[in-house]
Image (tube, rainbow, N blue to C red):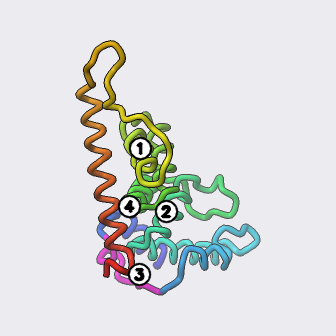
Amino acid sequence: MLRRTILVACLAWPAGVAAAPHCTASGVTQGDLVQQGLLNPSVPAERRQRLADALLCSALAGHAASQELAGTLYLQGRSRRGNVLPRDIPRARRLLTAAADRGRRQAMRALAELELADGHAREAALWSRVEQDLFGGVRVASSDVHPGTGRTSGRDVQLDAEVNLKVQAVRAQLAADSPAGH
C-alpha cells in the first residue's frame, strides 16, 4: 500500500506533500538512507524499497538533496547496481529540475546531460550555463558580437535573458533556503 501511495504521489509531482500525506519531515537525510543500504545490493530488496520510499517522501517534502538523488536514481534505473527504482525519464526530469531550481549543482549537470541526450539542446544549454554562472567556469556569452557582422543573434540574446532569469530565481531560492533566510 505504501509503495502504491508513493507511486501516486510521484505521478502527481510537483503537487508536493499534500499528494503524499504519509510523507512527513522525518529528519532522515539521503546520506542516512544510503548508509542504511539504499544502494547496497547485499541488503534485501524489500529493505532497499522501503529506503527508496523514504527517499521519495523526503523529495516530495521538498528536500533538494533528496530530489537530486531520487532524480539521479530514476535516470539510472536498475542499471545502477543496487538501485530498486526503475528508469523513468519523466520522473527523473521533474526531480532533477526541482533540485536544480534549488541550486543543486550535480542536478544541473545531470539535467543538462539528460536534455541533450533527449535532443533538447536549448534546455541543455540553459542548465549548463546556469551551472557555470552560479558555480564558476569561463564561458563566452552567446550574445557576444558575431565576428565580422557587428550584430548579435536575437535568439542568443533570448537565451542569455532566460539564463539570467533562471540564475536570479535560483539565487533567490538559495537565499530563502539558507538559515539566515528564515
Q: Which is more N-terminal, label 2 or label 1? A: 2
Q: Secondary structure at mark 4?
A: helix
Residue at the disc numbered 2 = 68
Could you tell whether 161 is left or right of 110 in the image?
left
| Inter-mark Cα distance, 1 to 4 | 17 Å
Q: Which is more N-terminal, label 4 or label 2? A: 2
Residue at the (58%, 53%) spot, across then down = 76
Q: Secondary structure at mark 2?
A: helix
Nearer to us of marks 3 and 4 is 4
The residue type indicated by label 2 comes to: Glu
At which x and y percent is residue 77?
A: 58, 55
- Tell me the tag on residue 98: 4
Magenta stretch contains residue 18: yes
Nearer to us of marks 1 and 4 is 1
The residue type indicated by label 1 comes to: Arg
Q: Which is more N-terminal, label 4 or label 1? A: 4
The quadrant where residue 15 appears: bottom left
Check disc 4: other Cα within 10 Å, few if <14, some if 14-19, many if 20+.
many
Q: Tell me which segment is drawn in magenta.
A: 16-26
Q: Are marks 1 and 2 in contact (CB under 8 Å)?
A: no
Residue at the (36%, 17%) spot, across then down = 147
Residue at the (61%, 64%) spot, across then down = 84
Residue at the disc numbered 1 = 129
Nearer to us of marks 1 and 3 is 1
Residue at the disc numbered 3 = 23
Q: Which is more N-terminal, label 4 or label 3? A: 3
Magenta stretch contains residue 110: no
- Tell me the tag on residue 24: none
